[in-house]
Image (cartoon, grey):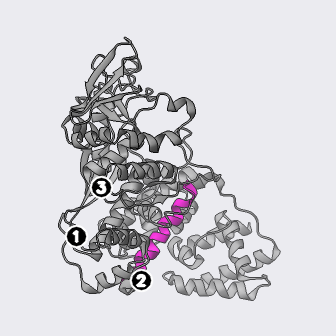
Amino acid sequence: MSTPTVPQELRDAALVSKAWPYEEARKLLKRYPNGPDKPIVFETGYGPSGLPHLGTFQEVARTLMVRHALTEMVDWPTRLIAFSDDMDGMRKVPPGVPHQDMMHEHLDQPLSRVPDPFGCGHKSYADHNNNLLRQFLDRFGFDYEFMASSDCYNGGRFDEALRQVLRKYDDIMEVMLPTLREERRQTYSPILPISPINSKVLQVPVEVVDAEAGLVRYTDPTSGESVEQSVLGGGAKLQWKVDWAMRWVALGVDYEMSGKDLIDSVTQSSKIARVLGARPPEGFNYELFLDENGEKISKTRGNGVTLDEWLTYAPEESLAFYLYREPKKAKQLSFGIIPKAVDEYQQFLAAYPDQRWDKRLGNPVHHVHAGKVPPARMPLTFALLLNLVGVASTDDKDLLWAFVKRYAPDVAPETHPELDALIGFAATYFRDFVKDSLKRRAPDATEAAALRDLDGRLAALPADATAEAIQDEVYEVGKSHPFESLRDWFKALYETLLGTSQGPRMGSFIALYGIDNSRKLIAEALA
């Protein structure tokens, strides 16, 4: 992919920006101080034993942020390979997959040779999931080249790198054996032959017979016979850490990031890449997400938030925004952080046009949208919409739009589809997470007096009073009554009128809900 020249002002700012995508891209400038003689290759890996998930999204999205940052710094061609490791043996049958008995018959075979249990015309279970991966990546408009391990092994693309593994077999063993338990050392081999009898990926010791011919010898675990076999053309695959290193070498990978849980794998694979005569790629290890209890998110346990769940309650760009921020810091990924992420994204989006380039490049929305930042067109916050849904006691979008048009008369679903979508998200989020938690309390004597004062002031305002004019009156009431602070006054408003301990700017809420309707809320609180 060739990259058009970017404005010089932007390029100058990119070359010195401290935002993390530029810091990462700067590693590639140091890697090629005189410029590369080939396209810069970025890679992300995927295991097709299951469906694409949030981890897949975050790794591809973050890698593309680094790729884009590099193109703003220099005019170097780049590629992104989305690699599916579909030669792995199926060690266990995934739960929930149909035809469990049939799947068990293919245990230990490469995922690319396990029949498709879904019966939808794909040539294998891996091919089914690889197709879902491509649909997944295309859904978000990611720019990538798909590559499958099975195609690379079976088609001979890895053959020369496999010969090099055989040539350096003893050196690779010296890297790997000290990292293994004693029992594992006795049977470990970097090479995993694929049985010509039952197609299983065999975990057996091997002996290199002829590196140039790609020949190894092993004892068949079923028959006990000695077998001489080529590892070329799909006759074998490599153990994980060796496989990763070999892939880097064979594909000329320059950059790949991975989770903190793979730090040891990166270390060992980097050593092996050097043994094979190549330089390991640049990259960094991002922190893992935590659930609301501070525990590591696990697909098996089902804690945390899935990709589809986030996109049920908020737009895609809010997730990309949340993933962008502080990738080396462990962050909570729970349903409770979604509204804040949505509103913070909108705040950064609104700030972008008035920022100088140095500030823009540190603004997350620049990286979320790869420099093509859309205008901020959201007149309401997610938090405000949540409160509207709560007090209006409806998820009827037409009725909610009637309130919105009172607040912002120039908007409509046809002209502001992003707001229309956000109203739907707010209604769904409120129904699932907020509704049952709301509980209005009765005001105390001081609060009741202030509420009566506010009611009188609202009655004196015109029906079309602005949010600012209403907010001024709210402030004046708080100052005129014996609250320790204005914060206590606003907390009283939230708890007595909205049933929550915190809420939106009250002037905006009253303008949105309407003065008359808001006075009815006050009357209910005072009753």
In the rendered image, residue 483, in percent from the top left (x then y), is placed at 78, 82
Q: Between residues 468 and 9, which one lies in front from this camera angle?
A: 9
In the rendered image, residue 219, in percent from the top left (x then y), is placed at 37, 19
Which residue bears the numbered disc 3? 253
Question: Tag 3, which secondary structure?
Answer: loop
Q: Amino acid at mark 2?
A: Lys
Question: Looking at the rendered structure, which numbered label has been put on residue 155?
Answer: none
Magenta stretch contains residue 418? no
Query: Can see residue 389?
Result: no
Question: Tag 1, which secondary structure?
Answer: loop
The N terminus - image quarter: bottom left
Q: Amino acid at mark 3?
A: Val
For marks 1 and 2 on the same chain, the one whose residue lies earlier in the sequence? 1
In the rendered image, residue 516, in percent from the top left (x then y), is placed at 56, 74
Residue 49 in the image: above or below residue 483: above
Residue drawn 37% across the image and 87% down it: 356
Which image quadrant is residue 10 in? bottom left
Q: Between residues 191 and 409, which one lies in front from this camera angle?
A: 191
Query: How many angstroms separate mark 3 from mark 2 (CA)?
Result: 31 Å
Which residue bears the numbered disc 2? 359
Residue 117 in the image: above or below residue 260: above
For marks 3 and 2 on the same chain, the one whose residue lies earlier in the sequence? 3
Question: Looking at the rendered structure, which numbered label has been put on residue 76?
Answer: 1
Which range is magenta? 330-353
**Badge 1, how many Cα within 10 Å: few under 14, some, many 20+?**
some
